Image (spheres, rainbow, N blue to C red):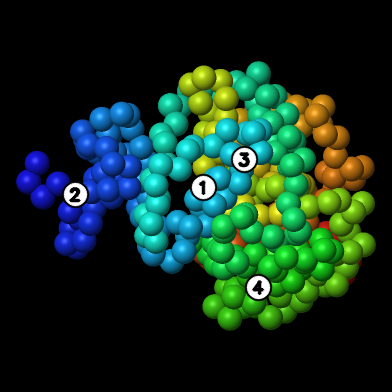
């Protein structure tokens, strides 16, 4: 095909990237959402993502490798990467079901149980300056979850939202009050878990073989309730079965349901920074019950 492998800006396109990074011949391509393309190679389909040369490809590849190393929840294999591009195996998707959801819950518990070196510790080979979606995310290790969560997962996005005018200073005081009280709200201390880190429903793929695959991680050491809270934030098929399977494998500490909103402050503030005022309102609604005002 004339121009194959060249994008409209004159740079290297997804087909050429897939061929270069995997050493396989290209058969066809299909543009998916945003900067993601499915490229069919002579040994099967792959997903090619343009990460923009920001270090996001390195962070995602390291995260996928770290999650795969746990031998728990399945993830796509990394076929190749460079500074700008990431090539992974393609997931043959099926339908969500109760049995697969219960299995996923048990596998997620097993993933978390493999642990991390510290709260905020990046995966081996992953950068300290990483991303969640397109928002910067600092992987700075800490030993105390409440202090670390306030300092590196709530306050940075709160400041960005206030600086952008998306949150008003008076509203920011609600989140600051939560951060002052987070050590009393956090529940029993837990050791760092191996987190996916961006576990919303869109990053959960129900495989044709009955096993879930997780994609697009923002992996780091963290509190296991954060992954579960994010999974509940935007809805997930058969969520009750996922949580039941998780609880069977690794029961959560008493009061975990009352802490869901606390753990959701992080993704809600990230969404506030990325997408604006509607998420600011949702974040405020989540924060107020913990502020004690």
Instruction: Give whichever of discs 3 and 4 has the lower sequence position.
Output: 3
Label 4 sits on a secondary structure element that is helix
Callout 1 crowding tier (Cα within 10 Å): few <14, some 14–19, many ≥20: many
The residue pinned by badge 4 equals: 156
Q: Position of residue 40 (x, y in %)?
A: 28, 34
The residue pinned by badge 3 equals: 69
Q: Which residue lies at the image location 85% right of the left edge and 72% below the top edge? A: 180
On the question of residue 138 being in view, the answer is: yes
Figure quadrant of the N terminus: top left
Q: Position of residue 99 (x, y in %)?
A: 65, 18
User: Residues at badges 3 and 2 in contact (C-beta under 8 Å)?
Assistant: no
Instruction: Give whichever of discs 2 and 4 has the lower sequence position.
Output: 2
Q: Which residue is more in the foreground, 170 or 3? A: 3
Gap between marks 4 and 1 measured at Cα: 22 Å
Label 1 sits on a secondary structure element that is loop
Nearer the camera: disc 1 or disc 2: 2
Above or below: residue 67 compared with residue 262: above
User: Residues at badges 1 and 2 in contact (C-beta under 8 Å)?
Assistant: no
The residue pinned by badge 2 equals: 5
The residue pinned by badge 1 equals: 216
Residue at the far front in the pictured view: 23
């Amino acid at each position: 095909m004339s121009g194959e492998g060249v994008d409209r800006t004159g740079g290297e396109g997804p087909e050429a990237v897939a061929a270069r990074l995997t050493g396989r011949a290209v058969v066809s391509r299909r543009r998916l959402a945003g900067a993601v393309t499915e490229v069919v190679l002579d040994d099967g389909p792959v997903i090619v993502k343009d990460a923009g040369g920001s270090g996001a490809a390195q962070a995602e590849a390291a995260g996928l490798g770290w999650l795969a190393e746990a031998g728990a929840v399945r993830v796509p294999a990394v076929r190749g990467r460079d500074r700008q591009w990431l090539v992974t195996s393609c997931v043959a998707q099926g339908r969500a079901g109760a049995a697969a959801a219960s299995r996923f819950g048990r596998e997620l518990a097993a993933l978390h149980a493999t642990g991390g070196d510290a709260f905020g510790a990046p995966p081996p080979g992953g950068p300290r300056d990483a991303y969640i979606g397109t928002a910067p995310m600092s992987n700075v290790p800490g030993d105390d979850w409440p202090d670390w969560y306030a300092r590196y997962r709530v306050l940075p996005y709160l400041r960005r939202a206030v600086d952008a005018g998306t949150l008003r200073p008076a509203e920011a005081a609600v989140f600051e009050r939560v951060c002052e009280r987070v050590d009393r709200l956090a529940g029993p201390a837990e050791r760092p878990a191996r987190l996916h880190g961006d576990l919303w429903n869109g990053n959960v793929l129900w495989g044709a073989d009955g096993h879930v695959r997780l994609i697009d991680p923002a992996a780091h050491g963290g509190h296991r309730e954060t992954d579960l809270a994010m999974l509940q934030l935007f809805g997930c098929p058969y969520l009750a079965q996922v949580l039941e399977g998780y609880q069977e494998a690794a029961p959560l500490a008493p009061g975990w349901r009352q802490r869901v909103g606390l753990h959701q402050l992080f993704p809600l503030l990230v969404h506030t920074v990325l997408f604006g005022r509607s998420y600011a309102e949702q974040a405020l609604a989540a924060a107020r019950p913990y502020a004690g005002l």
